[in-house]
Amino acid sequence: MGRLVPPASGNVYVDANCIIYSVEKVAPYAERLRPIWEAAAAGSIRVVSSEVSLLETLVRPLKEGNRRLEQFLLAFLLGSNEVRLISVDAGILVRAARVRAETGLKTPDAIHAATALASECVMFLTNDKDFERVNGLPVTVLSTVV
């Protein structure tokens, strides 16, 4: 298994799947993401994501009635130092509309991309190769980390 090398500094964007992989310890991705969380805990980088990730990560626990996972995700995303959620505002939505028009990404993915671009992220972590279509987005696809 390869090792993901975090940048020396800056904002690192994680999409909802990366959060799910990490929280639920999904192999092999949770292990691949560990250096990012360690760098964030050490303060050398800042992990960011869109508020859309809150919606996306809560769906399964709510559907399954998994109150423990729901509460853990809420605490992790809203009350921890490891990740900062970026608000979806009018500027993000306009930028997301442009991304969607240029790339054909679905609306939630366009919001993720627009949020990362607006946050000047130096790395965008995902397992979705479709994000590679977004100009200027520094995409790292987890499945290709070898």
Image (tube, rainbow, N blue to C red):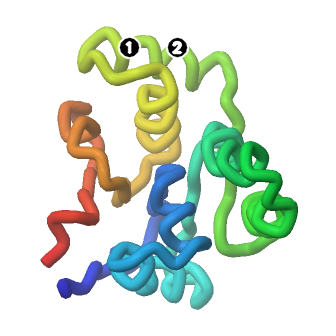
Viewer-side residue, 55 vs 3: 55
Estimate the x, y position of residue 95 in percent, counting from the top left.
Answer: 46, 20
**Residue designated by label 2:** 94
Residue at position x 51%, y 45% in the image: 119
Residue 31's place in the image compared with 131, above or below, is: below
CA separation in Å, label 1 and label 2? 6 Å
Residue 79 seen from this side: no
Q: Amino acid type of disc 1?
A: Arg
Residue at position x 57%, y 57% in the image: 48
Estimate the x, y position of residue 134 in percent, counting from the top left.
Answer: 25, 32
Residue at position x 53%, y 73% in the image: 22
Residue at position x 43%, y 32% in the image: 109
* Displayed quadrant of residue 124: bottom left
> The N terminus is located in which quarter?
bottom left
Viewer-side residue, 126 vs 48: 126
> The C terminus is located in which quarter?
bottom left
Disc 2 secondary structure class: helix
